[in-house]
Image: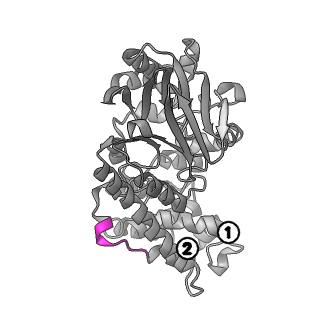
Amino acid sequence: MTIEQVEARLAGLTRHQAEVGSAWGHYSPNVARGFFQRSGPAVEDCRKMRTVINVAPRTWFIRMPFVNVVLFETDDGLVMVDSGGAAHGPALLEAVRQVSDRPLHTVIFTHAHIDHAYGLWAFQEADMMPQNIVAHENLNEWFNRYIRLRGLYCHHNQQSLQDWPATAADLIWPTLTYRDTLELEIGGERFVLRHHRGETDDATWIWVPGRQTIAAGDFYMHMLPNVGNPRRYQRHPEEWAEAVEEMAKLGCEVFLPGHGDAIAGFEAIRTALLDVAEVLRYIVDHTIDGLNDPAKRKDQIADSLKLPDHLTSNPKLQPHHATAKDICRMVIKQYTGWWDDRPANVDPAPIQLQAQEIVRLAGGMDALVSRTRELMGTDMQMACHLAEWAFYAEPSHASAQDVMIEAFMRRAEET
């Protein structure tokens, strides 16, 4: 087995994968692997797992694997918030036709992630395109980045390169963009679009005052915010907190997130949003204090973070995609360079040479592998470090390959 094969086998391991699927709705392995597919099992799973909920007059919450879409019926036509991934397109089209025969007037993209802005191809083929497709101005940069770095993003998202957009023609682009705030009047109703950087720098949330409804995109997830993901582009915890605090000040009675269940009632909505703001601000404040302390290395800032009990016990703030320490590290990344404050790492020796020296100090590969397996029963974090040293010292060594896979598979099962 090659180093690429071992790393490919481990690439899909994420924290709490099953719970994430549950928190977001039905989990579909087919959709997870095929967000950009336009036919096949991913498309069929979206159809089978689709649920359409009439949450308020002329307002529908369309739930599909991994993502929600919001649909408003107005006197001038339909306003749709997000369009899922490409695989969601046919199921979404059928859901829209099921609830209303009015034309699609406007589509608003909350951001450019692969589960939110790619299902309109099905509407295009059905000759049901909207008059306007609206998004924050940075969304176009994301589309271009996805094309330019398609190999990277395919690897990080465990997608097939043949499905991923390769040219601008493979995407349906916004017809109208905005910078900070945009107010649309459609069918005599106001739709207020607000931008804050959060999970992405193109994030939009929508306030519909006449319906006391917010379509929140990914600013709320029923879990610890996904703002520390270690494999992703820079995310913004401080501005995420600002966004949810702004939402909490509105008289919202129907709250529709991009993932997970709707929330009804002003007090329940306000509490959920302010809980998110509190945990993010706590982490940010701890991180900034640490960065201002010359006696602390970056790793010590994250390692010393401990949330108050009322936050760690909150069922809506549990870590699934990211931990509190991950969010801390994202803040560090936002404000500092790549160096981790350890002097040897300014210009480090190649990892393979470091690993080979560790193997020698351990008394050989057999001794290191044996110690790794001992630690698996008591300290999985340390066991994974030793497994990496063994594997990177000699990637073709069968025992090193086995212990690497075993350690990380067991750690994924336990977390």
**What residue type is disc 2 on?**
Ile
Residue 86 located within the stretch drawn in magenta: no
N-term-proximal mark, 2 vs 1: 1
Q: Is residue 142 above or below residue 57?
A: below
Out of 408 and 404, give the one closest to the viewer: 408
Q: Which mark is residue 337?
A: 1
The residue sitting at 50% across, 59% down in the picture is 242
Q: Is residue 240 left or right of residue 341?
A: left
Q: Which mark is residue 306?
A: none
Asked if residue 307 lies in the magenta stretch, the reply is: yes
Report x, y in % for residue 184.
57, 34
Residue 273's spot in the image, x, y percent? 38, 55
Q: Residues within 10 Å of mark 1 (few under 14, many from 20)?
A: few
Element class at badge 2: helix
Q: How is the image coloured?
A: one colour
Q: What distance separates the C-alpha of mark 2 from that of mark 1?
A: 28 Å
Residue type marked 1 = Gly
Q: Can you give x and y, in whole percent of width and height, for residue 386 in the image?
A: 47, 68
Q: Which residue is mark 2?
A: 358
Residue 267 image point, x, y percent: 29, 53
Q: Residue at position x 67%, y 69% from top?
A: 337
- Up the image or down, 269 lies above or below 393; here it is above
Q: Can the viewer see residue 168?
A: yes
Specify the segment rendered in magenta. Answer: 305-311
Compared across the picture, whether 295 is left or right of 33 comes to right
Q: Residues within 10 Å of mark 2 (few under 14, many from 20)?
A: some
Give the residue at the far bottom of this rendering. Answer: 295
In the image, residue 134 sits, relative to residue 104, either above or below, namely: below
